Image (cartoon, rainbow, N blue to C red):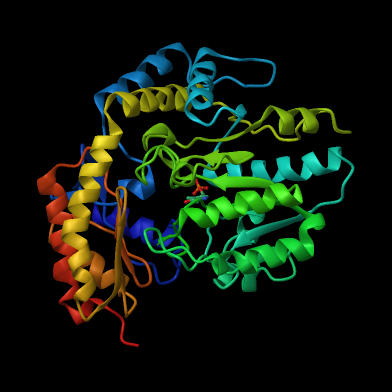
Amino acid sequence: MTPADLAFDRQHIWHPYTSMSEPLPCYPVVAARDTRLQLADGRELVDGMSSWWAAIHGYNHPRLNAAMHNQIAAMSHVMFGGITHPAAVALCRQLVAMTPAPLECVFLADSGSVAVEVAMKMALQYWQARGERRQRFLTLRRGYHGDTFAAMSVCDPQNSMHSLYEGYLPTHLFAREPQCAFGDAWHDEDINDFAALLEQHGSAVAAVILEPIVQGAGGMRFYHPRYLQRVRELCDQHGVLLIADEIATGFGRTGRLFACEHAAVVPDLICVGKALTGGTMTLSATLTTRAVADTISNGAAGCFMHGPTFMANPLACAVASESLAMLQENQWQQQVSAIETQLRQALLPLADHPAVVDARVLGAIGVIETHQPVDIAAIQAFFVERGVWIRPFGRLIYLMPPYIISREALTALTAAIAAALDRPQLFQKM
Ligand SMILES: *Cc1c(COP(=O)(O)O)cnc(C)c1O
């Protein structure tokens, strides 16, 4: 990429959550292979992010590439209205088989946020079909469910999205975020706030929506499985649907295929995305039960009112199907548990570092929470200089590497984090 390309980028292209007038620096990546990103100047970076939870098998994988090539040769896309195709059927078969038995009706959508919109619309249509006016959602503080409007309305209310869009977003119900961490002792008071909200508003609540066990972008928090079990019990008592947003946690990241399995809880709807296509293309899915699907279908509308142009895009379905097959064959449990062991050894001792509030690891996720927020431009430059790609936010420096990462590459990532903690200039002054 030429300097002119980079200047054009700065001048004309939005990046995620970035100012157009004072953009943060961007690093030009021209290729990626296995667990390495290649910069335009030839330098290689070990990837600690899996491109936001997605690239679980690493980059440029020959099997994923072959799946896409084969599908391109047949057809890249065809509308899904009135048409079906082998790639969609194969993928949905796998999704139905992998998820708990009652989840058997699959809606394929374009992105994680849209999968959340779909789940919330399904919950609303479900109650409408039952003749009950239930239009509120109950969720947890510190949650993250995406950037579209309905998804935004159930994200943590403290962050700026709610104040920015106040008056426009529907006001939902927010329970205090779980305090009992994964692996700590359980105290039943932890569920009190959630239980009280459901007690008070239960008959107006269409569904509870939450990220099971791991709250991702809202703080990288790992909470007690008993909390999720109590949520399921309370939803059943109040006849409220439970939507599990497994977009970040799905497909093995937390050490279980789905994070709900840590609590042996089965939701009424589940959203998956991110790792679904092995990090190659955008695709998501919302699965629900026969009972929910039938109720919606027998309602006044007679159908579920959603159908994106690129629904079930064959190219995305084909590569997702191959990625799920690889996940099973690669023995992801061993991969994830080896990463977990190494992350524990390397990161947990950093909890004693004076710059650190907490160090935590679950599955192939490692988190260092610091006292001071990072100076993103400075710390990013430091990491790139050390040959690693780690993108912290706020007071969180975290890793979620591809499952295929080698011991040495993972050591490069954890060593870079340890080194960063010793440099106060990489953090904002409070
Ligand atoms: C990333 C994410 C989303 C949104 O997915 P997009 O593909 O970015 O729209 C929703 N929920 C959770 C838990 C996520 O991590």
Residue 403 in view of the camera: no
The answer to whether any part of residue 219 appears in the image is yes
Viewer-side residue, 178 vs 396: 178
**Identity of the residue drawn at 44% across and 47% down:** 248
Q: In which quarter of the image is the C terminus?
A: bottom left
Residue 89 lies, with reference to residue 7, above or below; the image says above
Residue 425 placement (x, y as % from top left): 21, 81
Quarter of the image for residue 164 reads: bottom right
- Residue drawn at x 31%, y 86% is 429
x and y percentages locating residue 269 in the rendered image: 62, 39
* 73 with respect to 124 (left or right): left
**Percent position of residue 11, x then y:** 41, 62
Residue in the image at 52% along x and 52% along y: 211
Q: Nearer the viewer, residue 317 or 262?
A: 262
Residue drawn at point x = 34 percent, y = 26 percent: 328
Count of labels in the image: 0
Return the x and y of residue 282 as percentages of the image width and height.
Answer: 47, 37
Q: Residue most toward the left?
A: 408
The residue nearer to you, when weighing 36 against 364, is 364
Tell whether 241 sits left or right of 339. right
